[in-house]
Image (cartoon, helix red, strand yellow):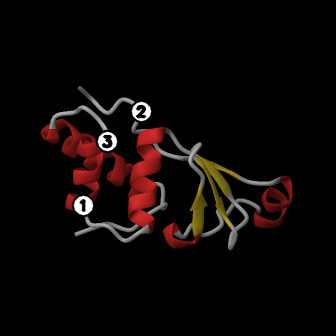
Amino acid sequence: MKLASLSTPIRHRSQSQVLASGAGSPVFHLHTVTWQADGFGFDATSGEFFTASPTALIVMQALGEGMTRLQILDRLTACFEVARSTAERDLESFLAELVHMGLAKEMN
């Protein structure tokens, strides 16, 4: 079973941010985003808000808590009926996408 709902959180900006920031993107800090149970996240330092799928929400919260890859993987396999190898592959892909988008730093 693939973690089909593990997709990148969608970044939104308020109208005032779009005007103020121009072409550049505000900085995203995993530790400053507050996530709600419904997948809505808000970064009070940048004013950006995000929406995330249930699976992405688990990963984003875990990253914000400073969890390691193995701890995140344990959390995913505890929450979803998925083979560990599948969860690991999907997690690696998701983390790589976050790094590519500048939403997270590479993890060891």
Q: Residues within 10 Å of mark 1 (few under 14, many from 20)?
A: few
Sequence order check, earlier mark of 3 and 2: 2
Mark 1 vs mark 3, foreground winner is 3
Sequence order check, earlier mark of 1 and 3: 1
Q: What type is the residue that disc 2 sits on?
A: Ser
Report the side of 47 relative to 64 (left or right). Answer: right
Q: What type is the residue that disc 3 sits on?
A: Cys
Q: Which residue is drawn at 48% across and 55% down?
A: 101
Q: Which residue is drawn at 67% across and 55% down?
A: 49
Report the side of 46 relative to 37 (left or right). Answer: right
Q: What type is the residue that disc 1 sits on?
A: Gln
Q: Residue at x 47, y 48 (%)?
A: 57
In the rendered structure, find residue 5 and report the number of the disc placed on it. 2
In the rendered structure, find residue 93 and report the number of the disc placed on it. none
**Residue 11 drawn at (x, y percent):** 62, 50
In the rendered structure, find residue 71 and report the number of the disc placed on it. 1
Mark 1 vs mark 2, foreground winner is 1
Quadrant (top left, top right, bottom left, bottom right) of the C terminus: bottom left
**Residue 91 drawn at (x, y percent):** 28, 47
**Residue 10 drawn at (x, y percent):** 58, 45
Count of all numbered marks drawn on residues in the image? 3
* Secondary structure at numbered mark 3: helix
The Cα atoms of the two marked residues, 3 and 2, are separated by 13 Å
Q: Residue 7, located in which quarter of the rendered image?
A: top left
Q: Residue 23, located in which quarter of the rendered image?
A: bottom right
The residue labelled by disc 3 is 79
**Residue 85 drawn at (x, y percent):** 13, 40
